[in-house]
Image (spheres, helix red, strand yellow):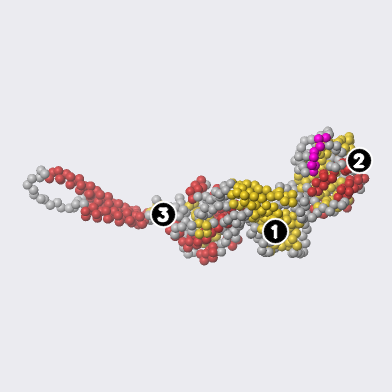
């Protein structure tokens, strides 16, 4: 307990007055003559004891009346914090949680509406001239400036639900940094008005412990939520005729069991797949939806469940592109063996409408066009310039694939220079003997769906001479084919978003057994099919602010580039820049709703993006008031105060916050009580 005016405590010396009166009685005694006093002796003793007790009680009442009267003038209080702010100038920041979870209802109404009203009460409780700051999940630039009372009231009235999810530490630390940079000596007060969901209430990340922070928890009615938490595909690359397997994680945050509910997938506005799911209370499941890509072009999908009252997380949007055709490039030289290998590739893809093969002589190679192709075949070539290798490495890392058929008679140093770019095992020598391919890695996904039946002792082609490589593994290189002596015949490497396939023998007439074998077609064709770039099927509103176009899409920058919201046809003008990864589309924080967004170039849709709301808001687990207080103590936030009685008049709450719990009224009541006790003792105790 502390005193607002401790100097009044000197008046406690007035306690000496009733003590002196008690010690020196100024009353004159009157003598009464009585004939026989023997019967009065016992009465005298008893009366003397009662009189002494009466006088002591009167003395105590007088002393206590004086003490509490002095205390009333000194104004005692119990401070709300260990260090109560007393600066005349104060900056008051109020964070209104306007996330989707604040759409829940409480006994006072919708939580967001209650939060807005409480923010206005806080504002009106402070004196005129106080500077205010407003924080919401939108983190708008205009809220970075101080507001007067009228401006603050206007801004609060415009706060609407937001899809953004902001941890408390971001608001707390930003306010601290801005105030410290301002150099103001005013007290820093920060109010949090929220439902205090567990995923965002990160008190342990608060940096500056000097801020006076106050926490007003709003308690919603008991709610249940069934929602789609996440979605992914089994294969991140998509081709025509491919069976898609879409995995959907569904969470149940209620105490109710759900059985045989429908899960639907719409593709390009048509119902494509449907299944039923069952999920236990406070649990989650992963459901699977399968379908086949029967058409090429942009694929716009929506996965849907039904649940109330929260509907923002009932849909999950996906988007990807199925290429109409795949482009392959064969790079050859003027050597005989290179011409022979090129002939086999031409024969394989000659009448194929899906795989388009283009040829380039290494002497007239257009390096700037390498990013146009999904697969690049190096057909028994010998020379690799540094400029070519640099560009090849870039396009492979960005999602293309390279296939190497080596020339046995070439300089090993040149080949090793190529292999080192992709961290492949280096060449150690040449084996001129004829070896039969004896092992196929059937378990690898590359060959897993190629053969319906696996022969125990299949007859495989014989290869006349091959390169030998280091036996020590330097990378994640996987052998797909191997010879009888254990040497590798074909290996695969993953290089960031792309792949590299390394043959240990050339493709020429001496090895025509391989070109004529049943193994040849699925091996090379699968290389092209597996060269499809990985695609992100969905993004999160408020987190993703840019998008890289697939590298085979070239924009006409002289024409308009727009992002069109497919729901309402609203348009966004992005910033387009060229980079090594492709054309970068920057749209910042302009995408605020979920759904499909089309990237249009001169009115033609060239790519698409699918956005979903952050699912942190779907996790309806809250901190209780006791848990909030415990967290504040654990993280040593000594200047933090939990406001439990949120529905009280905030002027009273603020008075307690700034001056502590006032006790002067109680002191006056107690002083009056003891004065009354003295009067009653004197009047009725005879």
Give me the C-alpha separation between circle 2 and circle 3.
97 Å
- Residue located beneath label 2 in the image: 510
Which of the pair 468/453 is nearer the observer? 453
Q: Secondary structure at mark 3?
A: strand
Query: Which residue is situated farthest in the front direction here?
Result: 260
Front: mark 2 or 3: 2
How many numbered badges does the structure rendering display? 3
Q: Which residue is mark 3?
A: 661
Marked residue nearer the N-terminal end (2 or 3): 2
Question: Which stretch is magenta?
Answer: 450-457
Q: Main secondary structure of the magenta part?
A: loop
Label 1's element? loop
Instruction: Name the residue that disc number 1 marks.
Output: 269
Label 1 crowd (10 A; few <14 / some 14-19 / many >=20): few
Q: Nearer the viewer, residue 425 or 103?
A: 103
Q: Earlier in the sequence, mark 3 or mark 1?
A: 1
Q: Which badge, 1 or 2, comes first in the chain's sequence?
A: 1
Q: From this view, report whether residue 17 is shown above or below residue 602.
A: above
Name the mark nearer the viewer: 3 or 1. 1
Quarter-of-image position of residue 601:
bottom right
91 horizontally vs 32: left or right: right
Residue shown at the point (74%, 64%) measured from the top left: 603
Residue 456 is a magenta residue: yes
């Amino acid at each position: 307990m502390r005193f607002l005016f401790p100097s009044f405590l000197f008046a406690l010396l007035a306690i000496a007055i009733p003590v002196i009166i008690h010690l020196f009685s100024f009353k004159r005694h009157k003598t009464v003559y009585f004939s026989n006093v023997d019967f009065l002796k016992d009465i005298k003793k008893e009366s003397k004891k009662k009189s002494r007790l009466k006088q002591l009680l009167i003395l105590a009442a007088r002393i206590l009346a004086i003490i509490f009267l002095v205390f009333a003038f000194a104004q005692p209080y119990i401070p709300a914090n260990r260090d109560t702010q007393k600066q005349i100038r104060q900056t008051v920041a109020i964070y209104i949680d306007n996330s989707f979870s604040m759409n829940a209802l409480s006994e006072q109404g919708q939580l967001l509406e209650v939060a807005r009203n409480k923010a206005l009460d806080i504002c009106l409780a402070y004196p005129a001239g106080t500077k205010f700051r407003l924080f919401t999940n939108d983190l708008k630039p205009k809220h970075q400036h101080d507001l007067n009372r009228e401006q603050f009231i206007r801004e609060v009235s415009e706060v609407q639900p937001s899809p953004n999810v902001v941890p408390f530490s971001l608001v707390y630390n930003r306010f601290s940094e801005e105030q410290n940079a301002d150099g103001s000596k005013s007290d820093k007060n920060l109010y949090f008005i929220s439902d205090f969901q567990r995923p965002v209430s990160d008190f342990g990340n608060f940096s500056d412990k000097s801020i006076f922070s106050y926490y007003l928890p709003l308690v919603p009615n008991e709610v249940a939520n069934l929602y789609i938490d996440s979605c992914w595909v089994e294969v991140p690359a998509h081709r025509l005729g491919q069976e898609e397997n879409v995995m959907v994680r569904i969470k149940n945050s209620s105490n109710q069991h759900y059985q045989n509910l429908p899960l639907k997938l719409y593709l390009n506005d048509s119902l494509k797949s449907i299944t039923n799911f069952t999920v236990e209370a406070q649990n989650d499941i992963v459901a699977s939806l399968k379908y086949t890509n029967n058409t090429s072009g942009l694929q716009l999908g929506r996965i849907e469940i039904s649940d109330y009252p929260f509907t923002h997380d009932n849909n999950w949007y996906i988007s990807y592109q199925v290429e109409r055709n795949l482009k392959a490039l064969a790079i050859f030289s003027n050597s005989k063996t290179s011409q022979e290998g090129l002939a086999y590739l031409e024969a394989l893809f000659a009448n194929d409408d899906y795989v388009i093969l283009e040829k380039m002589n290494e002497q007239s190679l257009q390096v700037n066009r390498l990013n146009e192709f999904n697969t690049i075949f190096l057909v028994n070539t010998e020379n690799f310039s540094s400029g070519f290798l640099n560009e090849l490495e870039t396009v492979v890392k960005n999602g293309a694939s390279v296939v190497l058929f080596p020339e046995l008679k070439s300089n090993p140093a040149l080949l090793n220079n190529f292999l080192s770019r992709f961290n492949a095992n280096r060449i150690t020598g040449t084996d001129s003997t004829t070896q039969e391919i004896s092992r196929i890695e059937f378990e690898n996904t590359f060959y897993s769906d190629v053969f319906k039946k696996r022969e125990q002792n299949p007859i495989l082609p014989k290869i006349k001479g091959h390169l030998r490589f280091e036996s020590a593994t330097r990378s994640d290189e996987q052998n797909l084919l191997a010879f009888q002596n254990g040497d590798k015949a074909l290996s695969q490497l993953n290089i960031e978003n792309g792949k590299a396939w390394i043959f240990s023998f050339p493709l020429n007439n001496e090895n025509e057994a391989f070109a004529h074998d049943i193994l040849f077609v699925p091996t090379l064709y699968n290389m092209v099919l597996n060269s499809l770039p990985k695609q992100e099927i969905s993004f999160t509103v408020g987190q993703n602010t840019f998008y890289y176009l697939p590298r085979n899409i070239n924009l006409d920058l002289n024409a308009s580039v727009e992002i069109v919201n497919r729901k309402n046809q609203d348009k966004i003008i992005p910033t387009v820049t060229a980079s090594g990864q492709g054309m970068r589309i920057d749209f910042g924080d302009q995408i605020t709703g979920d759904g499909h967004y089309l990237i249009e170039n001169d009115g033609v849709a060239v790519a698409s993006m699918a956005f979903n709301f952050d699912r942190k808001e779907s996790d309806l687990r809250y901190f209780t008031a006791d848990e909030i207080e415990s967290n504040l103590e654990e993280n040593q936030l000594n200047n933090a105060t939990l406001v439990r009685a949120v529905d009280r008049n905030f002027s009273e709450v603020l008075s307690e916050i700034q001056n502590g719990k006032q006790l002067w009224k109680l002191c006056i009541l107690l002083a009056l009580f003891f004065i009354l006790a003295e009067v009653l003792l004197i009047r009725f105790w005879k």
